[in-house]
Amino acid sequence: MYKPQRILSENSKTDYSLNLPVFGHCIPTPLCLTHCYAKTGRICMKHSRKKQEWVSKYLLVQPYGLKDLILECRPLNNVRLCGSGDLLNGHVSGIKKLANECPDTMFWGMTRKTTIANRLNDFYNENIKLLVSVDHTSPDKTWYYEGALCFGPRMPEDTVLPDDDRIKVVFPYHVHGHVGKGVQTHKKDCKAVWHKISGCRECGRCWKW
């Protein structure tokens, strides 16, 4: 029976992440469908997709166990949720369990699902922070969400962004670690994408709100 050696995934930008499948999990905007970062590179290779599917089932089947994942997360300063893909409603109880069992670990990330963000951000633990991800093709109903937002991917044609205090961070369109040609800078841009800092651990803007 398949089981990954390590449940968490790693990369140089976010350090540790809980990666999930794209298909059957995401509710993409039209922009997501054509520019999803999880459809290219190592994150979409066969072995990566196999692990993502295993992680999703693990969270669904063992929401009150999660012993191995808790042991991995407990020593860490922060873990990104949905490093790829998105959470399902059935994952919420498992994420809450993680937050309870790992009080010194910040669980942060982005979701296109306002219902998921509401359920986890309203949880009494302060170590869960989920931003709702929006772009210029997001449905109007998403903009009714009253909590914290992130904007992305920001394309070259996105020269004017909504003047909205709910937007905490902006992600310029980037592929394989390089910002797309013609994308201008914005004061709320993720500094790690522009390689102005070493990674998320040095900033924390995505969860310090």
Image (tube, rainbow, N blue to C red):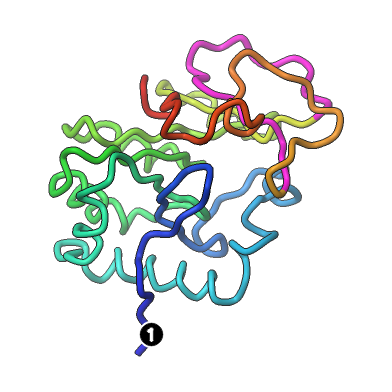
Position of 2 compared to 185: left or right? left
Magenta stretch mostly in which secondary structure? loop
On screen, residue 45 above or below 129: below
Tally of numbered tags? 1
Q: Amino acid at mark 1?
A: Tyr
Q: Quadrant of the C terminus?
A: top left
Q: Residue furthest right?
A: 182
On screen, residue 40 above or below 166: below
**Nearer the observer, 147 or 110:** 110
Position of 118 compared to 193: left or right? left
Element at label 1: loop
* Residue 63, x across and y down, in percent: 21, 62
Q: Residues within 10 Å of mark 1 (few under 14, many from 20)?
A: few
Judge whether residue 158 is colored magenta: yes
In terms of image quadrants, where is residue 44? Answer: bottom right
* Residue 41, x across and y down, in percent: 68, 61
* Residue 161, x across and y down, in percent: 69, 16
Q: Which residues are magenta?
A: 156-175
Identified at 16% across, 65% down, the residue is: 67
Judge whether residue 83 is colored magenta: no
* Residue 154, x across and y down, in percent: 71, 30
Position of 41 compared to 108: left or right? right
Instruction: State the residue position of label 1.
Output: 2
Identified at 73% across, 40% down, the residue is: 178
Q: Quadrant of the N terminus?
A: bottom left
Identified at 15% across, 62% down, the residue is: 64
**Nearer the observer, 74 or 137:** 74
Position of 140 compared to 128: left or right? right
Identified at 48% across, 17% down, the residue is: 166
In terms of image quadrants, where is residue 40? Answer: bottom right
